Image (cartoon, rainbow, N blue to C red):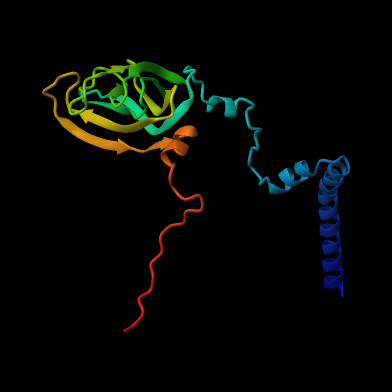
């Protein structure tokens, strides 16, 4: 009988101790819920022991916001752009080619942004009807085989994207990244050349979609009827 009585006493002490530990947490959750703070209760319940839940800095969104200097409407986005001069003198740069499809001259800006959304440089050219011009990150990249008629923003090393702004939506834009083994020499060898995706924006996208059915659907295969 004594062992049974001893076991019951020990279990009673453990139960009382657990109640004492849990009671303050329950009271805290009830106070938060009563004060209209269910988010705080949910945050406490999700937090694991040893984790430090820090608030999101108020300027985290601002750091990735685009800070543009061009005042012309945005027409194209270049998904990836960078400039890099390696320690062994090899060099990579980005080239944006713009063709004017309008019947009159168009003023075009190409602006380069780093990954924080801060402008690294801006180039402006006036392109005649039907003509083509190039914009590149820095003139220490040899442009061949691209046309040499263009302008550079003289950026430093960066990684990010580019915007094409123009005062007329009827412009075509394409982009490529070119890497060479020597900087600034016509005899340098191309180590790599990769096309970069560009996306039409706003009125430009609508202009180049003209003539497509409003309810266009992808083509579907028609099953053949057995003979």
Q: Is residue 2 visible?
A: yes
> Vertical placement of 222 versus 89: above or below?
below
Q: Position of residue 199 (x, y in %)?
A: 41, 37
Q: Position of residue 96 (x, y in %)?
A: 32, 27
Residue toward you, 81 or 104: 104
Is 206 situated left or right of 106 in this image?
Answer: right
Is 18 situated left or right of 104 in this image?
Answer: right
**Extreme residue toward the front, this view:** 103
Residue found 36% across the figure and 79% down from its top: 225
> Vertical placement of 79 versus 224: above or below?
above
Residue found 34% across the figure and 21% down from its top: 157
Is 105 situated left or right of 213 in this image?
Answer: left
Residue toward you, 137 or 145: 145
Residue found 29% across the figure and 27% down from its top: 130
Quarter of the image where the N terminus is located: bottom right
Q: Is residue 156 visible?
A: no
Is 202 situated left or right of 19 in this image?
Answer: left
Q: Position of residue 104 (x, y in %)?
A: 36, 22
Q: Position of residue 222 (x, y in %)?
A: 39, 70
Count of marks placed on residues: 0
> Vertical placement of 216 versus 98: above or below?
below
Residue toward you, 47 or 183: 183
**Extreme residue toward the bottom, this view:** 227
> Vertical placement of 215 versus 54: above or below?
below
Residue found 24% across the figure and 19% down from its top: 149
Quarter of the image where the C terminus is located: bottom left
Within the image, what quadrant is residue 34 found in? Answer: top right
């Amino acid at each position: 009988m004594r062992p049974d009585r001893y076991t019951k006493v020990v279990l009673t002490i453990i139960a009382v101790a657990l109640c004492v530990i849990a009671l303050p947490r329950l009271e805290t959750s009830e106070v938060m819920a009563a004060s209209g703070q269910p988010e705080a209760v949910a945050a406490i319940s999700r937090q694991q022991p040893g984790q430090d839940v820090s608030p999101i800095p108020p300027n985290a969104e601002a750091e990735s916001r685009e800070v543009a200097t061009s005042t012309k409407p945005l027409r194209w986005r270049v998904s990836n752009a960078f400039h890099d001069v390696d320690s062994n003198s090899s060099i990579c740069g980005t080239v944006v080619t713009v063709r004017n499809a309008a019947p009159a001259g168009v003023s075009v800006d190409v602006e380069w942004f780093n990954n924080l959304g801060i402008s690294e440089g801006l180039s402006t050219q006036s392109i005649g009807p039907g003509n083509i011009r190039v914009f590149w990150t820095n003139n220490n990249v040899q442009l061949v085989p691209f046309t040499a008629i263009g302008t550079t923003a003289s950026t430093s090393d960066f990684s990010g994207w580019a915007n094409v702004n123009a005062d007329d939506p009827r412009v075509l834009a394409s982009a490529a990244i070119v890497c060479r083994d020597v900087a600034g020499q016509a005899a340098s060898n191309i180590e790599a050349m990769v096309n970069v995706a560009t996306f039409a924006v706003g009125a430009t996208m609508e202009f180049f979609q003209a003539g497509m059915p409003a309810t266009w659907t992808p083509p579907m295969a028609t099953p053949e009827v057995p003979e």
